[in-house]
Image (cartoon, rainbow, N blue to C red):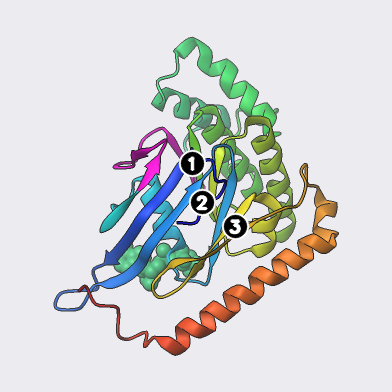
Amino acid sequence: MPSLDGAGTAAMAARSIQHYFPTGSGKRPLLVLDDISFDVPPGAFVSIVGASGCGKSTLLRIFAGLVRPTNGHAELGGRPITDADAHKGMVFQEDAVFPWLTVRQNVEYALRARRTDRSRRGGIAREWIDRVGLTGFEDAYPRQLSGGMRKRVDLARIYASDPEVLLMDEPFGALDAQTRLKLQEELLQLWEQRRKTVLFVTHDLDEAVYLSDLVVVLAARPGRVASIHPIDIPRPRTYETRGTERFRQLTVQLWHEIESLDRTSRSATDPQAPEVVA
Ligand SMILES: Nc1ncnc2c1ncn2[C@@H]1O[C@H](COP(=O)(O)OP(=O)(O)OP(=O)(O)O)[C@@H](O)[C@H]1O
């Protein structure tokens, strides 16, 4: 199993995960993930990349407890993950803010769900609204905010509820390029303040290299771990990091690897003939 730090005290881990999806009555199930094993060290920022359809989101949903794998399991703090709970904070591409609640109410709702003492909710919400740069917008409704601001509410909501780990599935995928860069920078600042373990799915290799300590590359059809890349670019990282030779080398290397895996999987597999359960 590829170990990411050699310490053996993973915050999260995938243990021989295999997953099939049904494809309709009388048809063979589709093998989507096969023998996925890796460790995520405590406090690390780990991204999962790979060709479209290789199973990134399915793997993240297994970590979230939203999908139960056919075989194997995901772990949080050494315990198998069996359901979705408040220990795991999820951020998706779509905003998870309630349109009928204000910014403050959205963040306080997350605290109520976490059973935070009523007397502390206002202060914690204020702190996180401030940290994500939304002070002055506490009483605004989501429809009055830009996409980037709604994503900031999402981040405030998740951080305020203080989960053990963050699971993010293309959280900035729907934003324009400029806002996306800004949100990446802000997420890194939050992460550096709190050092929560993050598992992050993205298509964007620049984003993966910029944010991560480790990048897990999945091969497709079925999804399996092809390689794990330590990102040895010093922190703190800034916009200028993207202009460095090492940043360029790493993104180009990942791009070539994913292209080559995609070519191999396309030539080796008939997409109309899903893998068969033995
Ligand atoms: N609920 C489901 N039922 C059946 N098949 C599914 C289901 N969810 C995903 N799949 C299939 O599983 C495979 C992996 O999908 P998944 O969304 O995990 O990949 P991905 O790498 O996240 O894709 P993308 O990068 O395009 O978002 C795809 O072939 C998809 O069609």
* Mark in front: 1 vs 3: 1
Secondary element at tag 2:
loop
**Magenta stretch, residue numbers:** 74-96
Question: For the residue with label 2, is its CB less than 8 Å from the closest atom of ligand 1?
Answer: no
Report the number of discs: 3
* Mark in front: 3 vs 2: 2
Q: Give how far apart the Cα atoms at labels 1 and 2 are.
A: 8 Å
Residue 138: image tag? none
Q: In this view, does 259 lie above or below 166?
A: below
| Residue on which disc 2 sits | 3
Residue 133 place in picture, x, y as percent: 71, 34
Q: Residues within 10 Å of mark 3 (few under 14, many from 20)?
A: many
Q: Residues within 10 Å of mark 1 (few under 14, many from 20)?
A: few
Amino acid bearing label 2: Ser
Asked whether 25 or 248 is in front, the reply is: 248
Secondary element at tag 1:
loop
| Residue on which disc 1 sits | 8
Asked whether 72 or 131 is in front, the reply is: 72
- Main SS category, magenta section: loop
The part of the image, by quadrant, that contains residue 143 is top right
Q: Which badge, 3 or 2, is on the more N-terminal residue?
A: 2
The quarter of the picture where the C terminus appears is bottom left
Residue 252 place in picture, x, y as percent: 72, 71
Amino acid bearing label 1: Gly
| Residue on which disc 3 sits | 215
Q: Which badge, 1 or 3, is on the more N-terminal residue?
A: 1
Q: Which badge, 1 or 2, is on the more N-terminal residue?
A: 2
Tags 1 and 2 in contact by the CB under 8 Å rule? yes
Amino acid bearing label 3: Val
Secondary element at tag 3:
strand
Q: Give how far apart the Cα atoms at labels 1 and 3 are.
A: 18 Å
Q: Does the image show residue 97? A: no
